[in-house]
Image (cartoon, rainbow, N blue to C red):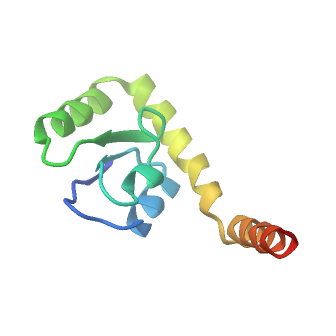
Amino acid sequence: DLYLLLSVTEAFNNSVILAQSLGLPCVVSRTGGLPENVVHEYSGFVVERYDSESAAKAIEYLISAPEVYNRYSKNASERTEEFSIKRQVVAFTRLYEKLLID
């Protein structure tokens, strides 16, 4: 129903992207690349490290508010398009072209 990852340290996490691609809102800790993976209050929640109470409240909120859950689920699925290979290739190409011109 949702994806929970409360790491203390973490890099950019592919499992969070995969979960979102399946339409799962995510609750993650604010560490490493996780805040880049999940947009707080858009595709899930980003809580402070070690803050299990906030994580529990976020989970409870998603479960008890179906309209919010459905919106976050849709947003999560759409958000993963930003991390597609095609989009990344275009972004890197633009970056390299800019670096070569400057």
Residue 11 screen position, x and y as percent: 36, 67
Residue 92 screen position, x and y as percent: 72, 71
Who is closer to the viewer here, 39 or 17?
39
- Give the quadrant of residue 46: top left
- Give the quadrant of residue 75: top right
Q: Residue at point 73% right, 70% down?
A: 86
Who is closer to the viewer here, 100 or 62?
100
Q: Residue at point 73% right, 65% down?
A: 91
Q: Residue at point 28% right, 32% down?
A: 63
Residue 7 screen position, x and y as percent: 22, 59
- Reply above or below: 71 against 74: above
- Reply above or below: 80 against 26: below
Who is closer to the viewer here, 53 or 31?
31
Q: Residue at point 45% right, 54% down?
A: 37
- Reply above or below: 76 against 96: above
Q: Is residue 86 left or right of residue 14?
A: right
Who is closer to the viewer here, 46 or 2?
46
Q: Is residue 101 left or right of residue 35?
A: right
